[in-house]
Image (cartoon, grey):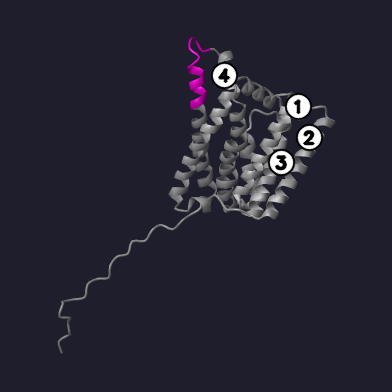
């Protein structure tokens, strides 16, 4: 018996449904390589301002003049601020390729007031402990770098700009990079949360080459605390706020100790 066929002819093949590549989180090496890319973007965003200030001096450029320009409060303020959009752009590229939502990848979500209170108290105790050790060992409570930059910014009429750079631009850039991007990828690799906290804190400490070994230790310990709070709260907004509060307190303390106003 002949087979029955539809009056419209043979059945059409089912439509091909395109499947999108699922979202992913960069693991150890992916995070490390993209991290270098983000750091390079941060450096490029900052060095453009430094180069402009150096070149606008006119005449021959010697090392002494370049160092003076690089260490000026206005130069540092603007370079830190211009580094922020560069970091955001590089982060967007790295996360866009992963197909994960930007805010989700970086844990840009609010946390509880309890976590904020715990963070403020823990940070206060930690910093006061380092200040106590500084006084007991006869060291400066604040690094000389801070006093010099604040004095230079005041002379240039850029003290407000420096406060914004230190207390807003720097915390946002550094936290999105260290506790946002680096921690997220490394915590989901073989390092786990503990290894990610340690390694991201080391990278963050390495960004502060203007300090000596003692303040390196303080910065690293603060990084460990912020990393733990990032793990506990699953919120990078929390570490951004605490980082900003810490920098603001350091600026106020330096102003009071050095008489800068």
The question of residue 59 being in magenta is answered with: yes
In whole angstroms, how far apart are the C-alphas of marks 4 and 3? 31 Å
Horizontally, residue 228 falls left or right of residue 40, namely: right
- For mark 2, what is the residue? 131
The question of residue 69 being in magenta is answered with: no
**What is the number of the mark on residue 257?**
1
The answer to which quarter of the image holds residue 157 is top right
In whole angstroms, how far apart are the C-alphas of marks 4 and 1? 25 Å
Identify the residue at the far bottom of this view. Answer: 1
Identify the residue at the far right of this view. Answer: 136
Q: Which residues are magenta?
A: 48-61
- For mark 4, what is the residue? 69
First of labels 4, 2 by sequence position: 4
Q: Is residue 229 above or below residue 158?
A: below
First of labels 1, 2 by sequence position: 2
Q: Position of residue 105 (x, y in %)?
A: 52, 51
- For mark 3, what is the residue? 221
């Amino acid at each position: 018996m002949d087979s029955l066929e539809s009056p419209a002819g043979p059945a059409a093949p089912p439509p091909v449904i395109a499947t999108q590549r699922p979202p992913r989180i960069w693991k150890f090496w992916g995070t490390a390589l993209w991290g270098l890319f983000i750091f390079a973007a941060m450096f490029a965003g900052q060095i453009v301002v430094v180069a402009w200030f150096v070149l606008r001096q006119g005449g021959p450029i010697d090392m002494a003049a370049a160092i003076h320009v690089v260490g000026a409060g206005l130069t540092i303020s603007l370079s830190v601020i211009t580094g922020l959009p560069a970091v955001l752009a590089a982060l967007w590229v790295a996360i866009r390729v992963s197909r994960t939502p930007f805010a989700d990848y970086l844990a840009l979500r609010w946390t509880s007031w309890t976590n904020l209170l715990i963070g403020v108290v823990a940070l206060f105790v930690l910093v006061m402990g380092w200040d106590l050790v500084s006084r007991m060992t006869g060291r400066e409570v604040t690094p000389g770098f801070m006093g010099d930059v604040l004095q230079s910014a005041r002379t240039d009429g850029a003290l407000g700009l420096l406060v914004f750079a230190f207390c807003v631009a720097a915390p946002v850039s550094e936290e999105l990079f260290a506790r946002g991007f680096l921690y997220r990828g490394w915590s989901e690799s073989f390092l786990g949360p503990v290894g990610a906290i340690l390694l991201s804190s080391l990278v963050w400490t390495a960004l502060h080459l203007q300090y000596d070994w003692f303040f390196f230790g303080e910065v690293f310990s603060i990084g460990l605390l912020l990393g733990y709070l990032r793990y506990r709260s699953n919120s990078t907004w929390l570490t951004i706020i605490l980082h900003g509060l810490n920098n603001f307190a350091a600026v106020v303390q330096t102003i009071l100790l050095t008489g800068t106003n």
